């Protein structure tokens, strides 16, 4: 598909057949493509590309419209770029993959990408977790599968890639190159290898490939932005990572539908060659508006704002109204939760940074009759947080994003994903008046009642959660009053190969005596709760372990459906732990899990329209996150 000098430029780019359709192509891809050209070659080259493509300034505005555009103009832009810059299509796609990472970082997604691993191998192992995260925002999308096997002796990775789309591996290689350079200060090299036997047909159809991946430290460390680029190109808007990635997914579909498919790379194109000069500008611009996906304003009559001072008077004059009716509060998710690129993430980070509540935090909530989600969590990060997760990963950011994920799950269950910011949450810092000791004590004594009034419970489950006395107390209340299908563990951002053993030990060695508390006198509250509700302390500990294993396994089943490797790595250990702890029936039940079948059953369509060279149809890997949750 490299343009040639023979004949009109349109010939190698336009598909043969009926008249070329002009339906819209959605997303930010042409906008990012222009940004790439400006970065690599400047505005003069972009002007030459427009001239070569026969596109006026008015048509350029139509091409760059992020809502919808004519695909024929986009094709002309791509073709003219390859001709003017003397780049075969494969090289252009690889450069675009690199620039896509640069643009993503500049769009405010650096914290999210950095949270995916302290090292490049860890990042590659978490790629499927990233896709799990994005399925909530784009439940109809079809994400590829990436299997990463790290060799600690050679310090290399064997990478296997499978997609329902053809010929897009240059994009993948460019993305990995730039992730290595930007996040880890590495030059990354690829040597093609044979794909597994079960992907041979897909490889023949240009939908699967495998590489031996190695790297070397990059001179000067992590790749930095060139400040001079600020004068060449405009700052990018603030765009969420799922939205950007969905645009990339649509771009791949656009390529396939217009027959711009390349053979997968079979040479070491990135091994010896210098990386293209793809620099970024302007780190994370703050925008005055929130993303366009912002939910609607507060629904009238749901909650009414009141201060803690008025609340004290209400308690004293409540008459026949119960105390819990007067004190039950809720806050909207948008006040305390943010996706990684949301402009209000710094505000949420400030909220989650410590447990010290003030009057303004109580004013984030308002009276509520019923609440969607009770949030249980540890305020302090694990002591080894920076060692395990990395020094640049902020615990408060991860918690804010985890709560946003839970809110999206609730909204998705109601078939209204855009309303996630209005999901009602109970969070201690916002719903207990921290500046009034009398009201504070009353609310603490009513926690069990508040849990009962919340439809669901979300536990932000770190590997030290079970070591905190108040967390154990809340777990005890949850076990008594909530059905298992209403309890959810948010662990996706915390769980990786390094933290998995910590989670297993957290449950394996749980005991009431090991639970820590700031005041030893607080232990009496938990002891009284257990004595009045459970047969014995030992019985309570057994139930905590069993339910924790079951809920962890359910959470990991979502990840396990992507491949047998992920099933063995992250799901099987929980069945093994159940057996080790003497829960034979639970272990047997977990071993019947077939997450891959459940995932296929949750596919939005039974059969993908992509056919391989032998004309065999294969099941589609894209799923509905809501349906998948239902199966699990």
Image (tube, grey):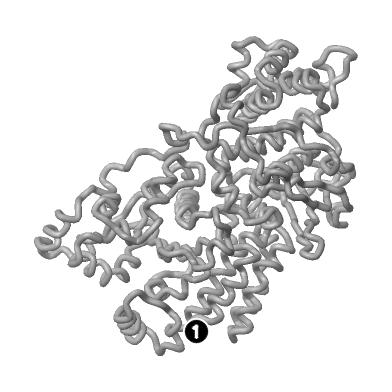
- Which residue does the numbered mark 1 point to in the structure image? 542
Question: How far across and down, in percent of the image, does residue 455 sit?
Answer: 38, 61
Question: How far across and down, in percent of the image, does residue 157 sit?
Answer: 78, 56
> Is 22 or 29 nearer to us in this picture?
29
Observer able to see residue 295: yes
> Is 605 or 626 nearer to us in this picture?
626
Question: How far across and down, in percent of the image, does residue 10 sit?
Answer: 80, 16
> Is 211 or 147 nearer to us in this picture?
211
Residue shown at 56%/69% (left/top)? Answer: 552
Q: Secondary structure at mark 1?
A: helix
Residue shown at 59%/79% (left/top)? Answer: 586
Q: Quadrant of the C terminus?
A: bottom right
Residue shown at 77%/64% (left/top)? Answer: 152
**Structural crowding at the residue carrying mark 1, measured as other residues with C-alpha within 10 Å and reported as few (<14), some (14–19) or many (≥20):** some
Quick one: which residue is furthest to the front in this view? Answer: 220
Using residue 596 as the reference point, say whether residue 283 is left or right of it.
Answer: left
């Amino acid at each position: 598909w490299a343009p040639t000098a023979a004949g009109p430029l349109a010939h190698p780019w336009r598909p043969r057949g009926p008249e070329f359709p002009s339906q819209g192509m959605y997303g930010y891809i042409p906008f990012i493509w222009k940004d790439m050209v400006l970065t690599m070659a400047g505005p003069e080259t972009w002007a030459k590309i427009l001239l070569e493509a026969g596109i006026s300034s008015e048509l350029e505005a139509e091409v760059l419209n992020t809502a919808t555009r004519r695909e024929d103009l986009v094709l002309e832009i791509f073709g003219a770029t390859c001709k003017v810059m003397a780049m075969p299509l494969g090289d252009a796609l690889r450069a675009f993959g690199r620039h896509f990472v640069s643009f993503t970082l500049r769009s405010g997604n650096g914290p999210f990408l950095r949270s995916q691993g302290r090292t490049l191998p860890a990042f590659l192992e978490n790629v499927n977790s990233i896709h799990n995260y994005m399925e909530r925002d784009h439940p109809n999308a079809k994400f590829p599968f990436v299997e990463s096997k790290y060799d600690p002796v050679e310090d290399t990775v064997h990478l296997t890639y499978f997609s329902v789309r053809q010929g897009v591996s240059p994009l993948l290689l460019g993305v990995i190159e730039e992730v290595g350079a930007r996040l880890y200060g590495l030059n990354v090299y690829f040597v093609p290898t044979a794909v597994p036997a079960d992907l041979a047909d897909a490889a023949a159809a240009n939908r699967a490939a495998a590489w031996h991946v190695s790297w070397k430290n990059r001179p000067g460390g992590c790749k930095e932005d060139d400040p001079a680029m600020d004068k060449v190109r405009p700052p990018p808007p603030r765009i969420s990572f799922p939205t950007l990635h969905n645009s990339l997914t649509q771009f791949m579909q656009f390529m396939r539908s217009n027959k711009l498919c390349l053979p997968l790379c079979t040479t070491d194109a990135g091994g010896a060659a210098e990386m293209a000069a793809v620099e970024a500008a302007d780190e994370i611009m703050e925008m005055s508006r929130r993303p366009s996906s912002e939910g609607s304003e507060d629904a009238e009559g749901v909650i009414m704002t009141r201060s803690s001072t008025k609340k004290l008077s209400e308690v004293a004059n409540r008459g026949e109204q119960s105390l819990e009716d007067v004190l039950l509060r809720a806050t909207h998710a948008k006040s305390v939760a943010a996706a990684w690129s949301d402009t209000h993430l710094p505000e949420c980070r400030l909220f989650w940074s410590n447990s010290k509540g003030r009057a303004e935090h109580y004013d984030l909530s308002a009276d509520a009759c019923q609440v969607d989600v009770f949030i249980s969590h540890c305020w302090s990060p694990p002591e080894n947080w920076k060692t395990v997760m990395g020094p640049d990963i902020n615990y408060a950011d991860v918690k804010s994003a985890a709560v946003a994920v839970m809110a999206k799950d609730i909204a998705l269950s109601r078939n209204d994903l855009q309303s996630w910011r209005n999901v009602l949450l109970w969070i201690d810092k916002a719903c207990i008046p921290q500046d009034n000791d009398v009201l504070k004590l009353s609310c603490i004594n009513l926690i069990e009642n508040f849990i009962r009034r919340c439809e669901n419970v979300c536990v932000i489950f770190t590997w030290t959660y079970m070591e905190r006395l108040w967390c154990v107390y809340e777990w005890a209340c949850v076990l008594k009053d909530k059905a298992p299908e209403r309890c959810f563990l948010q662990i996706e951002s915390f769980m990786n190969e390094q933290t998995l053993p910590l989670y297993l030990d957290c449950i394996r060695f749980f005991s009431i005596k090991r639970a820590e508390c700031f005041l030893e006198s607080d232990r009496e509250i938990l002891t009284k709760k257990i004595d009045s509700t459970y047969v014995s302390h030992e019985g309570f500990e057994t139930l905590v372990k069993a339910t924790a294993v079951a809920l962890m396994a359910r959470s990991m089943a979502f990840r396990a459906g992507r491949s047998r490797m992920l099933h063995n790595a992250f799901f099987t250990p929980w069945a093994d732990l159940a057996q080790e702890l003497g829960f034979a029936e639970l272990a047997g039940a977990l071993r019947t899990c077939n997450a891959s079948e459940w995932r296929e059953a949750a596919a939005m369509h039974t059969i993908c329209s992509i056919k391989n060279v032998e004309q065999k149809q294969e099941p589609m890997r894209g799923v509905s996150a809501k349906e998948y949750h239902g199966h699990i």
